[in-house]
Image (tube, coloured by chain):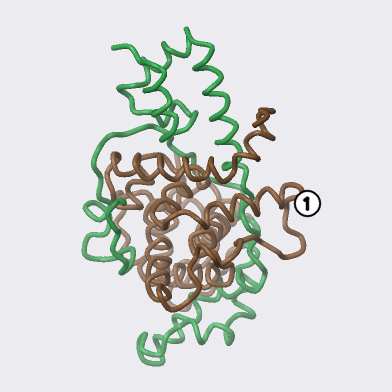
Amino acid sequence: MSMGMDEFRTLLDAWGADAARWPRERQADAEALLASSEEARLLLADEAAFDALLAGMPEPTPGAALVQDILAIPRAARQDRRAGGWRFGVLPALPRFAGLTAATLLGFYIGTTSLFQPAQSMAADTETVNISDYVFGEGIDAGSADGEAAE
Amino acid sequence: MKPSWEMTGLAMDSMRGAPTAGPADAAALNILSDEALMQRIGRGDEPAYAALVGRHLSRNLGFATRLLGDRAEGEEVMQEAFLKLWRGAANWQPGSARFTTWFYRVVLNLCIDRQRKRRGSQVPIDDAGDPVDERPGADADIHDRQVSRQIDGALAGLPERQREAVSLCYLQGLSNKEAADVLQVNIKALESLLTRGRAALKQRLGHLRNELTGITP
């Protein structure tokens, strides 16, 4: 089945210019169209520029205070648990522990930041997925908010 | 082959939690997967925790800040998220899922909770201004910062679900399946969110696109 320009536009409107994001069943037709149509190639270049615009957004640099507070969580959590479980909450106690422990772990943070980033899989997929089905089990979960239905 | 727990030589006393490893051990942690680090964290390994913070704090802070339109709230969410990570790591199930997907879901849920709490009682996110990093030392030059500000403003104007989908796919770089996992929708619903989100962004950022592509409107 061949692909027309309208369908190609629809494809780009959703998934952008990265062919790896396109549904597998449409990739071959889209590539065939690109091989034969200058208009399709121009459209693709335009979408690629837009993708690059979004992908080029800088990530914020975490401030030292935030890093220290987050690195102090394990020690604060242990102390809090000894004081009676989680009932007092951990976050309010963080400043008490943000010194030595955080300073020690800061070395690990600095030593590991940006040195390893897992490769991102860009494969398109058409499965229906529900992460809670295979990850959370009875233990760790991702929180209380319910995923709203797609608009 | 990834080194095992024993091969790295890290000696952690999980009861006392005192980190005793040095720079060489930090380098050893770098080659472990996120999931392997989670297993270590579940045993009280603080250097492994620090390594995971180093890998994921910045990009998840960006994600939370964009969803909430507020840097300070984004930072609070990150503290809550890493507390949840630390407390829940002992229950992490090896081989169950990618850590990245799970942690984005944690951050997203915390953001959704905050959005719900403030909905109707505070300034709507669309009017909350541009969630940009104003601190000295931010990486971008003035032009890039202005462009970033405009993109952040356009993202802030999207409906929440579209903003989440666009952020995960096009800014955070998650695959379609990973983004659908985080949002707990199927691929078709993700496609719908992205189509509307991209269309709205293109409309709002048309002048930037023209600047990039050399197209005169």
Instruction: Judge whether B188 appears above or below B145 on screen.
Output: above
Q: Residue at x 76, y 60 (%)?
A: B137
SS category of the residue bearing label 1: helix
Instruction: Judge whether B149 appears above or below B178 on screen.
Output: below
Q: Chain of mark 1?
A: B
Q: On the image, numbered disc 1 is attached to which residue?
A: B142
Q: Nearer the viewer, residue A23 or B30?
A: A23
Residue A135: x %, y % from top left: 27, 54
Q: Nearer the viewer, residue B15 or B195?
A: B195
Task: Residue lying at the far top in this picture: please name it.
Answer: A36
Q: Nearer the viewer, residue B22 or B82?
A: B82
In the displayed structure, does residue A71 sit left or right of residue A35?
Answer: right
Task: Residue lying at the far bottom in this picture: please name it.
Answer: A83
Is residue A86 visible in the rendered image? The answer is yes
> Considering the image in quadrants, where does the N terminus of chain B appear?
top left
For badge 1, the amino acid type reads: Ile
Instruction: Judge whether B171 appears above or below B80 on screen.
Output: above
Q: Nearer the viewer, residue B174 or A69?
A: B174
In the displayed structure, does residue B118 sit left or right of residue A43?
Answer: left
Residue A63: x %, y % from top left: 66, 67
Q: What chain is the brown one?
A: B
Residue B158: x %, y % from top left: 47, 54
Q: Residue at x 41, y 66 (%)?
A: B85
In the displayed structure, does residue B193 sit left or right of residue A45?
Answer: left
Q: Number of callouts in the render?
A: 1
Q: Residue at x 78, y 51 (%)?
A: B142
Q: What chain is the green one?
A: A
Task: Give the crowd class for mark 1: few <14, some 14-19, many >=20 residues within 10 Å.
Answer: few
Instruction: Judge whether B100 appears above or below A38 on screen.
Output: below
Task: Residue lying at the far front in this picture: please name it.
Answer: B217
Residue B129: x %, y % from top left: 60, 64
